[in-house]
Amino acid sequence: MNNRRSRETDFKAGIKLNAWLLPVLVVIFAALYLFTGYRGWLVFFIGSGGAWLLAALWVYSLKRGLSVNRKIHLAWAAAGDSVPELLELKNKSRFPVVWIEIADESDRLVDPVRLVSDVGSQASRRRHPIHLFKKRGLYTLGPTRLRTGDPFGIYTLTLYDQHSNTILITPPQLPLQNLTIAPSGWAGDRQRQRHAIEREISDSGVRNYVPGDSLKRIHWPASAHNDTLIVRQLESAASDDWQIFVDLEEAAQTGVGQDSTLELSIVLAASLAARGFREYRRVGLALAGPKLVWLEPRSDSLHRWQLLRALSEAETGKSSLTSLVSLKPPTHRATWIIITSTTDPAWVGCIRRQHQQRNVMVLLVDPIDFGGSTDQNKVTAVLTHFGIPYARMPGTLLKEAYLSTSRRVQKTPADLGRQQRYMEQGRSSWQRID
């Protein structure tokens, strides 16, 4: 009973009568035979009525027996990756499927699946379509539409499979190994006396336990009091942690689509996060697009997934960089890395005080390289006046990131052979609709 309800929820079916004159003819033949007694009309009645009945039984049997199963064995991939998918069509009915059209109803795929096949009774067929994802984002594969009918063309059956699979496509990354970012420290570290006594590790507070935390950092009295695991949050005199701020203000962006300051900002943030994790740092993220994302520096696997997803789905918003850096009080003495393409230096005053307590590094995405009319000379002048380090990030870095992506997309002979085998698998039963 539960399986039947689940199927009715997951599948929506529609049956359309194409030969609408057939029922009229059946009634006419039956009436003529009854009034005239001529056996010829009986033959026409039996023939047309039998075809109608057989077509109805055929279609209703396929409605109960047809199903499609789509699987992707990856949770995420990088932009430019080719991701294989398993598509399996099952027919549990006693009637064969003479023809069936399979169409992917996904709205974000550049090349959605559209296939035509046939399936025998009590049989199944498999296909391995390959999807190429060139843009970052969260993609949904499905729902899937199946369209088939009886051999006589009397009925058309349409099935909608509501199942869907999601895959996260992360931004391309740059090595950025030549970018030097100094560790942060306590206020007054630059003027610290040679023989000053200072603890190298200090408790900065407590927080809930997350997978990956060391058991040595569990605060047992606080855990017993709150009936949940609580850990000490430690900071060092020179913190190696990074807090990345990405300016997503719509007014500060230049360019369109993948050729824009927004895209380069996202690529730089993803590249810095990946570099930080490779160097065993804890990395945080702050951005304000359509919704606010504020992730404190951590390094566990769940945090990395949350960070990558936030960057993959990042879009422009109304919040300015000034409001973003002032939104929450700093609870962690991590190095602040600010990525912005704005030409208005008003936000620099907000980070001047932070620069006295921690290290701040500014990455300036040049809007001129993306068709902008105003440069960032005013911003660099104010940063230089306050002694805040910065680095200019030219638009060629974005081309370099996607150039490495296009190189990765180029398939080896083994990949091409595998894809050709997928395309030729059951060539007589699978056809691609262009």
Image (spheres, helix red, strand yellow):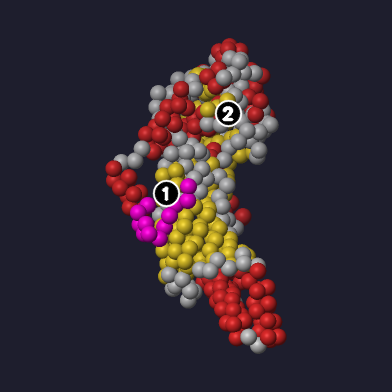
Q: Residues within 10 Å of mark 1 (few under 14, many from 20)?
A: some
Q: Position of residue 37 (x, y in %)?
A: 65, 88
Residue drawn at (46%, 22%) of the image:
396
Question: Does residue 88 lie above or below 64 as drawn?
Answer: above
Kindly indicate the quadrant of the structure image that contains residue 117.
bottom left
Question: Of 244 and 33, which appears nearest the observer?
Answer: 33
**Could one spot residue 30 in this view of the protein?**
yes
Q: Residue furthest left?
A: 413
Residue drawn at (55%, 45%) of the image:
108
Residue drawn at (49%, 45%) of the image:
111
Q: Position of residue 205 (x, y in %)?
A: 58, 41
Q: Amino acid at mark 2?
A: Val
Q: Which residues are magenta?
A: 423-434
Question: Does residue 263 lie above or below 20 as drawn?
Answer: above
Q: Residues within 10 Å of mark 2 (few under 14, many from 20)?
A: few
**Could one spot residue 309 in this view of the protein?**
no
Q: Amino acid at mark 1?
A: Ile
Q: Is residue 242 magenta?
A: no
Question: Of 159 and 88, which appears nearest the observer?
Answer: 159
Quote the CA–CA distance across marks 2 and 1.
28 Å
Q: Residue furthest bottom?
A: 37
What residue is shown with label 1? 130
Question: Of 76 and 420, which appears nearest the observer?
Answer: 420
What residue is shown with label 2? 256
Residue drawn at (47%, 27%) of the image:
398
Question: Does residue 97 lie above or below 345 as drawn?
Answer: below
- Indicate the quadrant containing the N terminus: top left, top right, bottom left or bottom right: bottom right
Numbered badge on residue 196: none
Q: Position of residue 179 (x, y in %)?
A: 43, 24
